[in-house]
Amino acid sequence: MSFYDLAKSRYSVRKFSDKEIESEKLEKILLAGRIAPTAKNNQPQRVYVLESEDAMEKVNKLTRCVYGAPLVLLVCYDETEVWHNPLREGYNAGEVDASIVCTHMMLEAWEQGISSCWVGMFNDREVSAAYNLPNHIKPVALLPLGYADKNAEPSPRHDEVRDESETVFYL
Ligand SMILES: Cc1cc2nc3c(=O)[nH]c(=O)nc-3n(C[C@H](O)[C@H](O)[C@H](O)COP(=O)(O)O)c2cc1C
């Protein structure tokens, strides 16, 4: 499959089956995250694999967007390791780095036949407290992963793509 076909076919799955993810597939997904580009190659991402009964019970209380997935990746960054742009006051690349890592994993998962849904709808303080994350570890995204339920389908808005003239500008 070409990259375009892979990206075009992916959609946010909001109904998972309870089939477990094979460990080799999970390893490949995690590896795709590890090879993602990060600012200055600092690799400040910290990925927590939520798979135990306890961790899954907690995440299901922290967000309503797990959608029955058997496993969730909690993607964070370590604030002590982020690149600070000296030309932009107060800016660090932590969220961007973690987001690129998360995107790599989301697309690798899709190639492996594993579905996901990027989830931002959570309270970061509640997440940190639930998993005893130190203060310098900042949650960015949750990524429920699993096999799509046979009745899963893209949301009605999935195919809405803005006209190029609205989002691309040639200068
Ligand atoms: C930063 C970000 C946060 C998101 N948060 C949520 C969320 O909390 N819950 C959810 O169901 N989907 C969430 N999504 C998924 C988007 O709604 C979805 O990607 C978008 O509607 C396009 O649909 P598609 O992924 O099927 O192409 C999020 C996506 C991104 C990139």
Image (cartoon, rainbow, N blue to C red):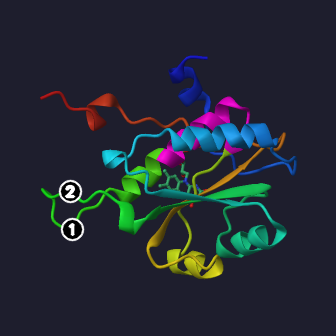
Q: Position of residue 83 (x, y in %)?
A: 29, 56
Q: Residue at x 37, y 45 (%)?
A: 41
Task: Specify the segment rendered in magenta.
Answer: 101-115
**In the image, which disc is placed on residue 64?**
none
Q: Is mark 1 within 8 Å of ligand 1?
A: no
Instruction: Give the main secondary structure of the magenta stretch.
Output: helix
Between 158 and 118, the one lying in front of the other is: 118
The quadrant holding residue 28 is top right
Q: Is residue 153 visible from the viewing direction of this image?
A: no
Q: Quadrant of residue 100?
A: top left
Type of residue at label 1? Gly
- Relative side of 117 to 58, left or right: left
Q: Is residue 19 above or below residue 95?
A: above
Q: Assess mark 2: CB under 8 A from ligand 1? A: no
Tell me the number on the disc at residue 90. Answer: 1
Image spot of residue 45 (x, y percent): 48, 56
Residue 80, percent from left and from top = 37, 68
Provide residue 61's location: percent of width, then percent of height: 71, 76
Is 54 in the magenta? no
Distance Cα–Cα, label 2 vs label 1: 8 Å
The residue carrying mark 2 is: 85
Mark 2 or mark 1: which comes first in sequence? 2
Helix, strand or loop for disc 2: loop
